[in-house]
Image (cartoon, rainbow, N blue to C red):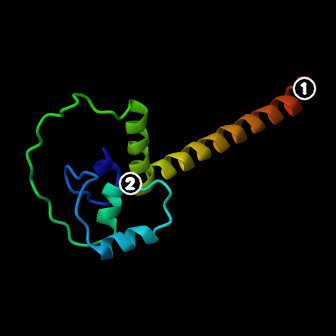
Amino acid sequence: MLAALSPLRLPLDAGDFGLMSRRVIDEIRKMPEHHRYLRGLRTWVGFRQVGIAIERSARRAGRTKCSPLKLLKLASDGIFAFSIVPLRAAAILGAVAIGLSTLFSLYSIYVKLWLHSP
């Protein structure tokens, strides 16, 4: 989903675990973000990345310990940090609200002045 919303091309199946040089870590730590979406930040700083294909075995403990709420927070961190779509959606929603308010105000003035409604 983030690939469709963001101009940043994130590597497929990028996880939170990886080996990084000190230069990459220092660049990421300079950033002011409070909610760091590490998968995106690693790509955004611009250093070369090499993916290593691994075969993941089944979990020993069974299911993930991440709650659906925590996964939703992780997704929202990625979307809000690396996409302009939420900002555009808020701007469009605000413009629609202003437009509807203006139309209703004009209608109210019309009713009051020309129809002499109380």
Position of 99 relative to 27 (above/below): above
Where does residue 17 sit, x and y in percent of width and height? 25, 54
Q: Which residue is most to the top?
A: 118
Q: Give the residue type at disc 2.
A: Tyr
Numbered-mark total: 2
Work out which quarter of the rendered image holds the C terminus and state it: top right
Cα–Cα span, label 2 and label 1: 59 Å
Q: Give the residue type at disc 1.
A: His
Closer to us: 114 or 26: 26
| Residue tagged 1 | 116
| Residue tagged 2 | 37
Q: Counting residues from the N terminus, which is met first, the one under dot 2 or under dot 1?
A: 2
Q: Residues within 10 Å of mark 1 (few under 14, many from 20)?
A: few
Q: How crowded is mark 2: few (under 14 residues within 10 Å), some or many (20 or more)?
A: some
Residue 62 shown left or right of residue 35 in the figure: left
Name the residue located 45 percent from the left edge and 51 percent from the top edge: 80
Where does residue 54 sit, x and y in percent of width and height? 9, 50
Position of 50 relative to 59 (above/below): below
Where does residue 2 sit, x and y in percent of width and height? 32, 48
Residue 65 shown left or right of residue 49 in the figure: right
Which is in the foreground here, disc 2 or disc 1? 2
